[in-house]
Amino acid sequence: MQKVTMEDLGKIYTLSEVSYSPDGTAAAFVVSQAQVKENKYTSSIWVLENGVPRKLTSGGAESSYLWLDEESLLFPGDRKKSHKPEPGQACTVYNRIDIHGGEAEELFTIPMKVKSIRKISSHEFLIIGLYQHNAIEVTGLEGKEREDAIERLEEEKDYEVFDELPFWANGKGVVNKQRSRLYLYDSDNGECRLLSPEFMNVSSFDYDRENDRVLYYGHDYQWMDDQKDDMFVCGVHSGKSVEIGLQHRYGVSGAAFLGDKVVFAASTREKYGSSENPVFFLADPRTGEVTELADLDPSMYSSVGSDCRYGGGRSHKATESGWYYTETRGFNSYIVRLDRAGKETVVSPQIDGSVDCFDYFEGNFLYVGMRENGLQELYTCREGEGKEEKLTGFNEEYLNTHKVAPLHPLNFVDKDGVEIDGWVIEPVDYDPQKTYPGILDVHGGPKTVYGVPFFHEMQLWASEGYFVFFCNPRGGDGKGNEFADIRGKRYGVLDYNDLMEFTDKVLEKYPQIDRAHIGMTGGSYGGFMANWIIGHTDRFAAVASQRSISNFISKCLTTDIGYYHNLSAVQADPWKNPEDMWERSPLKYADKCKTPTLFVQSDEDYRCWMGDAIQMFTALRMHGVPTRLCLFHGENHELSRSGKPKHRIRRLREITNWFDQYLKG
């Protein structure tokens, strides 16, 4: 049996985008893999028929497909490299391929970057396309006018103009005056007709074929995105539009047609802030009238963490029998059905792990799942039967040939009477007669959870001879609004206390852990906690702080979510109560730090901007604390999950070497 290594990222398969064919007789999904030598990811479309999977495409860049009919798929990609859009413009080339074989054929080209697409007739498609309001138009110009426009385009590459919030977004770059808009595209004549308001950033849409109408929602703004949604039902061809009565008070988590009604989940975020769980509503698409269906405090969608995913997929779907969606409960996620009476029922097997995406057809579910200490595979089950069948084994060879250390639950009730879920991974080839260093790993969010799926970094450190332990302190997901609410003066207090108590419990249970050689790491919120910990305790011998937060005053004024999410977290702003923001900022306590600390940061991380890591690094240097900062160029907040493979390996090497130096040295 082999130990888990850093380079194993290239041996792991990830699955995504599972969907049934229109008649349910077949299905398709995407398989991706990191190619370490080439420093990229490859993706291909697979087809499932009679329970047997087979590879359909082999170009290495196929994903984001849709079913055209029972026999063929549509997917984007300029495979022949024959389309050169106008300067400053973009286009998306779509190809058709028969699921029973043959070469893909180019079908049509849409003159914009397409984010999502849905077929509604033989030649019509609803799309969300990217539109830049400040773009310099070249199309249709000739002669001197065209030359001047191209010259202006070249000159504008040296400038960025910001005149709204947010002006940039993690993973998207500069988004000032950029909008995702809803269009009707006609492949017969190549026309795109705008359906949504000019400046609305459309989040999602659903189509009602029987009544030829589209439901869509999004943020409509020109000055500052206040994170409030407007929602409309629009006749695709009639043009008649009805606004759903949200009164610009709600942020929408999801919406769909449910028979003759619209069902949606939304929150005002007035009681529990920006991470507040939604309430369910029904709306009449003819009048826009809204009624509350149920207030169930659901943690919609899967927030169960892993660093072994790539790509997305469907997380909710409405049928005549109800609205199906993934939901995090405790440290697991399942498929749940909401019926018209407002009752929730778990309809997938309640097995430890995560359901990452799914599709549904006539009582059958097909889903990508991660089961205990396992990697992604494709599963199926009948609604409500409690049993599932595993359909693929992409990662079986890897798991069967590597020393994957088991997870040992360690739950406890904290001093405030709150139950906390936690786990310990013992070192590979663990000998109870020996002593070992340990690593506390803290998740991001904070409104996410650790669970039992395979986590590469943790298994790597176990293979390197470390105890690894982790838990879900208050602030996390899966246990309702009250558990998740650590805003204001509780931020860095309730959660910190839980983590320290958990560490005490681990050391009590495992005297084999050398108390003088314990490390700690975490990213995003976990990076905040890393910075907070080194200013409040010296119990850790080394810390690795990733994509971190150190100064809420600067973060709230620089990042894509700072001006609303971070202000909500600390319940303060720089003008009314800056002292409260500074009180919650780890940078305030930097003069008390003694712990050697590594900072890992990406220069295109607009979620946790590199200025915070640089401030903390500088402060530690000024106060004589051993520190190091590794800055990754061209990476963003997703470095540890979907960064370039070589960068992900370098990240792991930086952290592991830092811990080896101070915990084993």
Image: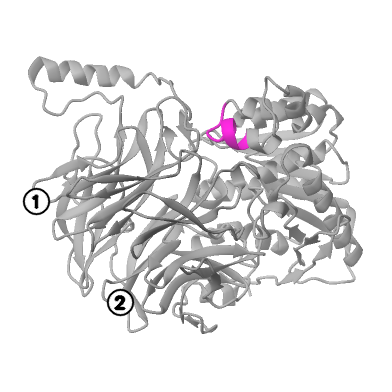
Can residue 374 be seen by looking at this rendering? yes
Mark 1 and mark 2 in contact (Cβ < 8 Å)? no
Question: How many discs mark residues in the rendered view?
Answer: 2
Asked if the stretch drawn in magenta spans residue 172, the answer is no
Query: Which circle's residue, 2 or 1, is located before the other in the chain?
Result: 2
Q: Which residue is mark 1?
A: 188
Is 71 located above or below residue 445 in the figure? below
Task: Give the CA distance from mark 2 to mark 1.
Answer: 28 Å
Magenta stretch in the rendered image = 558-566
Mark 1 surroundings within 10 Å by alpha-carbon count, few (fewer than 14), some (14 through 19), many (20 or more):
few
Q: Is residue 390 above or below residue 507?
A: below
Nearer to us in this view, 3 or 218 = 218
Mark 1 secondary-structure assignment: loop
Query: Can you tell which quarter of the image residue 607 is in?
Result: top right
Residue 58 picture location, percent across and down? 29, 64
Using the rendered view, name the quadrant where residue 461 is placed: bottom right
Examine the rendered structure and indicate whether residue 531 appears above or below residue 425. Answer: above
Say few, some or many: other residues with alpha carbon within 10 Å of mark 2 (under 14 / 14 to 19 / 20 or more). some
**Residue 85 on image: x %, y %:** 19, 36
Q: Secondary structure at mark 2?
A: loop
Q: Is residue 552 left or right of residue 413?
A: left
> Is 564 one of the magenta-colored residues?
yes
Question: Picture coordinates of residue 314 (x, y %)?
Answer: 41, 61
Q: Label 2, on which residue?
A: 24
Please, what is the three-letter code of the amino acid marked with disc 2? Gly
- The residue shown at (73%, 28%) is 581
Q: Residue at x 79, y 44 (%)?
A: 542
What residue do we see at 66% from left, 34% from top? 629
Find residue 370 and report its horizontal and vertical position in percent: 55, 69
